[in-house]
Amino acid sequence: MPRKLISSAVVLPDNRALDWLNIIRQLGRAELSAMVALSALTGYLFSKQHWTLEALLVLLAVMLLATGCSALNQWQEQELDARMKRTQHRPLPSGALSPKSALSFALVCIVSGLLL
């Protein structure tokens, strides 16, 4: 895999790594999951009145749970998503990601979030 060199200290990833990250972002609906996690963090901070390490754990746990639930939802609805014009370009209907990989990703995120 060719890499693009900017200087001897900086190496940019090839397009495959960026494509994979974009697929994971779409599968977990990263933007929506981040909003859910930030909402949980806000509620936590209002209840505790100060910043703690526990706040970061809450943020990370809720982000993992929201991401995993979004991925699980897309896995469950992949056949319906393939029929709708609005959702047919998502990772599963488009074939960018296998259903087994999507389910594995969802379960890892959900279990990790629950453990936190």
Image (cartoon, rainbow, N blue to C red):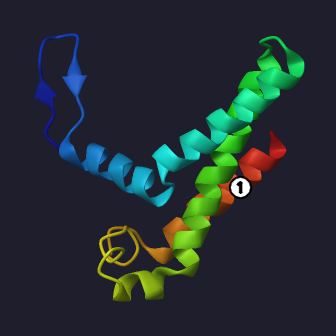
Dot 1, how many residues are within 10 Å of its Cα: few (below 14), some (14-19), or many (20+)? many
x 24%, y 34%: residue: 13
Q: Quadrant of residue 110?
A: bottom right
Q: Quadrant of residue 96?
A: bottom left
Compared with residue 100, is residue 35 higher up or lower down, i.e. above or below? above
Image spot of residue 82 (x, y percent): 37, 84
x 59%, y 52%: residue: 67
Image spot of residue 89 (x, y percent): 30, 71
Image spot of residue 86 (x, y percent): 32, 74
Q: Amino acid at mark 1?
A: Ile
**Element assignment for label 1:** helix
Is 7 placed left or right of 20 in the picture? left
Residue at image mark 1: 110
Question: Which one is nearer the viewer's eye here, 10 or 69?
Answer: 69
x 24%, y 49%: residue: 16
Point out the residue furthest to the right here: 48
x 78%, y 21%: residue: 45
Compared with residue 75, is residue 21 higher up or lower down, i.e. above or below? above
Q: Quadrant of the C terminus?
A: top right
Point out the residue furthest to the front here: 46
Compared with residue 31, is residue 97 higher up or lower down, i.e. above or below? below
Q: Quadrant of the N terminus?
A: top left
